[in-house]
């Protein structure tokens, strides 16, 4: 909580609108809502099934490569270890083609996907507006976010983070517009982590006809209480594209599989 308050104070101090009444009111409202949400989360935590998994039996949690990758992503990703484990397995399951991430923020999952790709020479592209972020075309389903959330990152820091991965390229901008000119085809894998309704819907439409044989899409935040827009976008996409199968994955991801390509 203190970290969140500190971050908001810093953002307020550096804003040119810091003495604007509307801006102050918006910030104050955000703090009150965060406090209320924290109380709700604390109350709900007591009702959970625990322990969530019996970690000591999970072979993967002892895999040195996986552990090292999780350690590298730590502090730069919004994903928990369970979701990182799903990514690790699925990156290694798909067929040949190009690898993508849409929604990269500070680069944690981008680096983790590159680590999971191992020695593969396949190209990897990740897309995000970075410091120019965070969302466009938001709807009432995206109330957990403000248009300028996720700006506490820098394009150059993600470029530096991926510097040791010769096939990786970070691209600044909103997908799919930012992919114009790249002529993306034969997509083997995409991690789609854009949180909001319109962005998820639009990205899925772009990706579907460009998948390679044995291609996969992993959607983050499916089943997340704070992002109902992601579920709506995925469900609408499935209704419009019955050739796709969905596998919800614990805790809050979905795997989309194009049946004819498998
Ligand atoms: C939850 S963060 C991504 C976290 C990251 N995958 C990780 O955990 O390492 C969501 C990001 O998606 C970005 N985003 C939103 N809409 C986008 C779009 N249309 N194209 C690319 N990025 C987008 C936001 O700016 C934000 O940085």
Image (cartoon, helix red, strand yellow):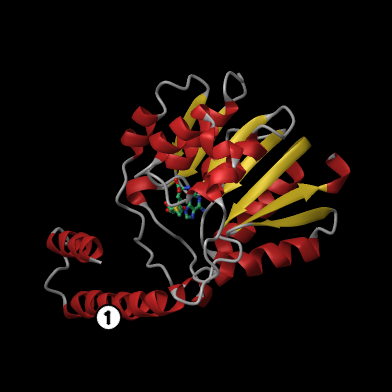
Residue 161's place in the image compared with 33, above or below, is above
Q: Quadrant of residue 12?
A: bottom left
Q: Nearer the viewer, residue 103 or 175?
A: 103
Q: Nearer the viewer, residue 35 or 197?
A: 35
Q: Quadrant of residue 191?
A: top right
Name the spot of residue 30 as percent of width and height, x first. 29, 75
**What quarter of the picture does the C terminus occupy?**
top right
Q: Is residue 88 left or right of residue 112?
A: right
Q: Is residue 214 left or right of residue 60?
A: right
Q: Is residue 155 visible?
A: yes
Q: Is residue 175 visible?
A: no
Residue at the spot x=49%, y=35% of the render? 112
Tell me the crowding category of disc 1: few under 14, some 14 to 19, or many 20 or more residues within 10 angstroms, Cα based: few
Name the spot of residue 200 as percent of width and height, x first. 59, 58
Residue at the spot x=65%, y=70% of the render? 232
Q: Which residue is mark 1?
A: 32
Residue at the spot x=70%, y=35% of the render? 188
């Amino acid at each position: 909580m203190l970290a969140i308050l500190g971050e908001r104070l810093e953002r307020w101090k550096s804003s040119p609108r810091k003495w604007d009444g509307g801006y102050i009111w918006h910030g104050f409202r955000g703090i009150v809502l965060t406090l209320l949400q924290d109380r709700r989360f604390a109350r709900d935590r007591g009702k959970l099934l625990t322990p969530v998994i019996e970690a000591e039996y999970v072979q993967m949690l002892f895999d040195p490569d996986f552990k090292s990758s999780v350690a590298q992503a730590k502090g730069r990703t919004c994903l928990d270890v369970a979701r990182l484990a799903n990514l690790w397995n699925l990156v290694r399951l798909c067929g040949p083609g190009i690898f993508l991430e849409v929604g990269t923020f500070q680069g944690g999952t981008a680096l983790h996907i590159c680590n999971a790709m191992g020695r593969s020479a396949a190209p990897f592209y990740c897309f995000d507006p970075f410091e120019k972020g965070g969302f466009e075309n938001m709807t009432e389903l995206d109330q957990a976010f403000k248009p300028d959330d996720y700006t506490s990152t820098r394009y150059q820091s993600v470029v530096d983070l991926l510097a040791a991965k010769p096939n990786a390229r970070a691209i600044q901008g909103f997908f799919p517009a930012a992919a114009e000119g790249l002529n993306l085809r034969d997509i083997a894998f995409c991690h789609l982590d854009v949180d909001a309704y319109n962005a998820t819907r639009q990205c899925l439409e772009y990706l579907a006809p460009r998948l390679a044989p044995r291609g996969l899409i992993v959607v983050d935040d499916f089943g997340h209480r704070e992002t109902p827009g992601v579920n709506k976008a995925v469900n609408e996409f499935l209704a419009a594209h019955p050739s796709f199968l969905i596998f919800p994955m614990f805790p809050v991801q979905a795997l989309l599989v194009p049946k004819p390509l498998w």
